[in-house]
Image (cartoon, rainbow, N blue to C red):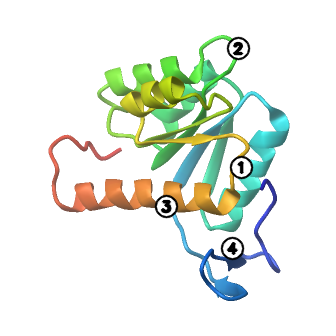
Amino acid sequence: MLYPLSYEGGGASLRHRRGTRGWQYHGPVADGIVLVVDDDAVILKLLQVNFSLEGYVVIAAQGGAEALRLAREEAPDVVVLDVMMPGIDGLEVARQLQADPSTAHLPILLLSAKAQVSDIDAGRELAGDYVTKPFDAIDLLDRVGALVARRRSAVRCGDPRIAEG
């Protein structure tokens, strides 16, 4: 599913959870900065809208070089990164982010149409999570929320591997 989850804007949403009855109201559930990276303008816009409606500040990049620059300049809380992009692909962006001490702490979620086990395994070696396209927007929001929460918990606990941006 790729569609905005908002109802009446303002970060509030109606969500239907598997195993529950009907729709449940969820007020603003997130805060923080998400860097979304995809070379497909339609997917990029859908990601921007969905994360914005959930309360995130969203920064968008349409390619790897722009993603690297924005990650260093804006210090996002999480990076949602397409794998297959022209120029610098998502896997190389992830490698470069991890190699740079100023961005090595950033959680990365890879988003890709590559759904073979070998692709997913390779992606998970570089990133905190891997989601295949087409994706369920609610699942993606939940996974990003978990990555942000995990990072914030590590920062609060004084994990020396986490450098606050």
Which mark is first along the chain, 1 or 2? 1
Mark 3 residue element: helix
Q: Most extreme residue toward the top, as rendered?
A: 87
Locate residue 61 relative to residue 5 in the image: left or right.
left
Real-space CA distance between mark 1 and mark 4, rounded to the nearest whole angstrom: 14 Å
Real-space CA distance between mark 2 and mark 1, rounded to the nearest whole angstrom: 19 Å
Q: Image point 70% across, 40% down: which residue?
A: 133
Q: Residues within 10 Å of mark 1 (few under 14, many from 20)?
A: many
Give yes or no for contact between labels 2 and 4 (Cβ–Cβ under 8 Å). no
Residue 98 found in image quarter: top left
Residue under pointer 3: 145
User: Does residue 154 lie above or below 71 as drawn?
Assistant: below
Mark 1 residue element: helix
User: Does residue 16 lie above or below 162 as drawn?
Assistant: below
Can you tell which mark lies on residue 86?
2
Residue under pointer 1: 47
Spot occupied by residue 138 in the image (x, y as percentages of width and height): 65, 63
Can you tell which mark lies on residue 11?
4
Amino acid carrying label 4: it is Gly
